[in-house]
Image (cartoon, rainbow, N blue to C red):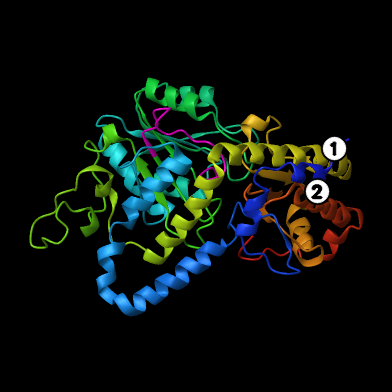
């Protein structure tokens, strides 16, 4: 018998953070924060203030804004990533940052011509790595558990691998990789290790410096709640920064940015991986989201994420499994991020029925996976129970068979 949701919520040390976010009166039950986080109230206030500042300061505002990619990066490094000042910048998109770091890593390993990732990695990661023009070696990992140490060791065995690039949390299954062990395996093979933290930053503990990670990228609009299209981040370990050169030479990465008549010379440190003008509105939103993570503590956030997903797994076994739903997420709490994947042969229509008929907003990943995301800062155990109960109702009433089976562009 599963625990009582109200009792779990009453004992939740992070319960007060729910009040930090915007909720629509009578709005749907939102379990898609793993795709786009909720809007923090402080972000509304900060952006309104910035718009006013823009109106009066005009170009003079750049005296304060110009260093935001670095200062916000330092705050993110400390609060959520386990990195040191001077190792993270907030800039560009995950796609662009992944390209910059992967290309730089490949160039730093002459004679090594292969890059390793897993076949189930997020599409943009695979596309970028495929576009590097080298051999892309795909791991065919377990679809639920994701890639492990043995998979990486086997892929790197020929000795020709320059870079291993994986996601810490799998976007489809929610599987949490063994970051320390996989990083060690890549290093043992003479490869650099690049982690995509898009589904883990702000949800689980990362420990980039502690575990000797070389490179990382990630987005800020999921568990960091920075808003649609918010700038991403990149991390370069301090010891590597002087060895790597960005393939996108922009004026924000120039040693003396406003000495405009000189040839390009990369700035010292991680700043060399900046390119064009930063997104100031987005950076202010990232800072607000990072503040919430710092105030709650990433350890407490990760612990609640494990508890929320464990509760969802219990409810799945009790309520959903008898109705033909299969768990697509690891059962070990230490091997999960903050979302749970539920597989059903009619997954797409189940997802649409939840949105159209049950007032629940999850998302869907082909071919058969409905994802329930439980961001710890604002998700209650009662929300988990209610989402599962509404899903049960859809299946028992067979409402999913009454909705349009055609895919929409956004799923």
Q: Count every numbered label the image shows and give the total.
A: 2
Residue at x 33%, y 57% (from the top left corner): 68
Residue at x 27%, y 56% (from the top left corner): 275
Question: 10 Å neighbourhood of mark 2: few (<14), some, or many (≥20)?
Answer: some
Answer yes or no: is residue 367 visible.
no
- Which residue lies under the disc numbered 1? 2
Position of residue 163 in the picture relative to residue 393 (left or right): left
Residue 200 picture location, percent across and down: 54, 42
Asked if residue 283 is positioned above or below residue 236 in the image, the reply reads: below
Q: Which numbered circle lies on residue 36?
A: none
Q: Is residue 203 magenta?
A: yes
Asked if residue 59 is positioned above or below residue 91 in the image, the reply reads: below
| Label 2 close to label 1 by CB (< 8 Å) | yes
**Secondary element type, mark 2:** helix
Asked if residue 183 is positioned above or below residue 80 in the image, the reply reads: above
Residue 124 picture location, percent across and down: 47, 51
Residue 329 picture location, percent across and down: 68, 38
Q: Which residues are magenta?
A: 199-215
Name the foreground residue: 238 vs 391: 238
Quadrant of res 164? top left
Name the foreground residue: 171 vs 3: 3
Q: Is residue 84 magenta?
A: no
Disc on the earlier residue, 2 or 1: 1
- Which residue lies under the disc numbered 2? 385
């Amino acid at each position: 018998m599963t625990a009582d949701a109200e009792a779990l919520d009453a004992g939740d040390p992070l319960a007060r953070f729910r009040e930090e976010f915007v909720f629509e009166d009578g709005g749907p039950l939102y379990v898609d924060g793993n795709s786009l986080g909720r809007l923090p109230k402080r972000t509304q206030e900060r952006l309104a203030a910035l718009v006013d500042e823009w109106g009066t300061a005009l170009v003079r505002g750049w005296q304060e804004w110009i260093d935001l990619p670095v200062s916000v990066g330092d705050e993110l490094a400390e609060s959520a990533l386990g990195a040191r000042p001077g190792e993270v910048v907030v800039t560009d998109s995950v796609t662009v940052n992944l390209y910059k770091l992967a290309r730089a890593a490949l160039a730093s390993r002459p004679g090594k011509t292969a890059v390793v990732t897993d076949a189930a990695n997020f599409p943009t990661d695979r596309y970028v790595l495929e576009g590097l023009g080298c051999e892309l070696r795909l791991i065919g990992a377990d679809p639920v558990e994701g890639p492990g140490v043995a998979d990486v060791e086997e892929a790197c065995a020929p000795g020709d691998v320059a870079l291993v690039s994986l996601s810490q949390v799998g976007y489809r299954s929610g599987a949490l990789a063994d970051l320390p062990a996989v990083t060690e395996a890549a290093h043992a093979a003479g490869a650099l290790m690049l982690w995509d933290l898009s589904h883990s930053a702000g949800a689980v503990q990362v420990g980039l410096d502690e575990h000797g990670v070389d490179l990382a990228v990630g987005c800020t609009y999921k568990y960091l709640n920075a808003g649609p299209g918010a700038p991403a981040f990149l991390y370069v370990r301090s010891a590597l920064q002087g060895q790597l050169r960005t393939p996108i030479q922009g004026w924000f990465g120039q040693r003396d940015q406003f000495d405009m008549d000189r040839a390009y010379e990369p700035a010292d440190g991680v700043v060399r991986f900046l390119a064009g003008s930063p997104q100031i509105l987005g950076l202010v939103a990232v800072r607000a989201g990072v503040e919430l993570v710092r105030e709650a503590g990433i350890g407490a956030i990760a612990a609640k994420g494990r508890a929320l997903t464990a509760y969802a797994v219990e409810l799945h076994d009790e309520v959903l499994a008898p109705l033909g739903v299969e768990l697509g997420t690891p059962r070990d709490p230490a091997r999960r991020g903050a979302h749970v994947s539920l597989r059903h042969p009619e997954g797409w229509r189940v997802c649409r029925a939840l949105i159209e008929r049950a007032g629940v907003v999850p998302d869907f990943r082909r071919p058969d996976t409905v994802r329930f995301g439980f961001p710890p800062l604002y998700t209650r155990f009662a929300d988990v129970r209610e989402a599962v109960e509404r899903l049960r109702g859809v299946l028992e009433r067979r409402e999913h068979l009454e909705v349009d089976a055609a895919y929409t562009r956004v799923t």
